[in-house]
Image: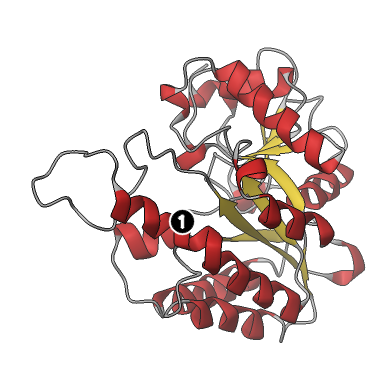
Amino acid sequence: MLPTERLSYSAVSQRPPLRLPGGARMAVWVIVNVEEWDPNETMPRTVLTPPAGGSPMPDVPNWAWHEYGNRVGFWRILDVFDRHDVPGVLAINGKAISSYEPIARAALDRHWEFIGHGYSQKNMQKVADEREDIRKTKDAIRAFTGRDPRGWLGPGLTETWETPDILVEEGFDYVCDWVLDDEPVVLKTRTKPIVNVPYTQECNDVAMMLIQHHKASEYYDRAVDQFDQIYADSERSARVMALVIHPYIMGAPHRLKHFARVFDHIKKHDDVVFMTGEKILDWYLSERPNALAGA
């Protein structure tokens, strides 16, 4: 299906209001992307351009740049979550669960939600068998956590024309790739619908630091500005905001404090609740009990 066949246009100002429990007006969820980069393949991203150009292998400096995040950066980030008592969501490559087992164990011990993020860090359009990749990711998460993941985030937000269809057929309840709203939306598939939970390309360290090349403090500035506006928007109807980080980016020593400061600002607001993706999904379906039937 074309994207326009999966959902119709809907103006947020014309929808019935959404209400969060306990008088909260806004939900925030925080996603940590943990990936495994295969040194036998071209690196998904680079911090250094090889002197002679091209894509040499092994690409030690760029592989090591990412690996630092899993060896060191993640543990700095974890301290921030612990200090602020914020629930985390781990978007993880299926293969990374065994390769970086201490990371997965730390997330499991803290009751973080695990969502699928591809079996390895590769565009879904380049995966040889998309269904098998999704299935292997689901199986790896189930084997480690004891339950199937409910959510999916494509590597680099990539999808094929069939991704939402396959996700539903493989038992997933929500996806995060459709970054087009501040409320959950329902997507049609060839079987039953799937919900898209709001994600972000704006408060995302890949966009800010690696593509737009901002200084580290931009993460705090943008996250606070984005929060303040969505908070104002939520006066009439509840909204959702996502914060997205990667250990090799915001876990770098010079960036971490700017991520941590965001929570100081958000926690000044008693009517904002931190949630996981599946809790946002369940809340939304309780507010819109006919949402899936009407897609």
Of residues 135 and 209, the one nearer the viewer is 135
Residue 223 lies left or right of residue 98; in this view the side is: left
* Spot occupied by residue 51 in the image (x, y as percentages of width and height): 10, 52
Above/below status of 85 relative to 124: below
Q: Check disc 1 and report the residue beneath it.
A: 67
> Would you say 63 lies left or right of 57 here?
right
Task: Please report the residue visible at 57 percent of the width from the left and 51 percent of the height from the top.
Answer: 34
Q: Residue at x 63, y 36 (%)?
A: 94
Image point (12%, 44%), residue name: 53
Q: What is the secondary structure assignment of the residue under circle 1?
A: helix
Q: Position of residue 292 (x, y in %)?
A: 79, 29
- Give left or right: position of 250 versus 58: right
Considering depth in this image, is 50 or 196 the residue closer to the camera?
A: 50
Residue 201 image offset from top left, x and y in percent: 46, 54
Q: Is residue 178 visible?
A: yes
Q: Position of residue 37 (x, y in %)?
A: 45, 43
Q: For this view, does 47 lie left or right of residue 208?
A: left
* Residue farthest along the left direction in this orientation: 52
Can you see residue 188?
no
Locate the C terminus by quadrant: top right
Instruction: Tally the marks.
Output: 1
Comparing 276 with 65, the one in front is 65
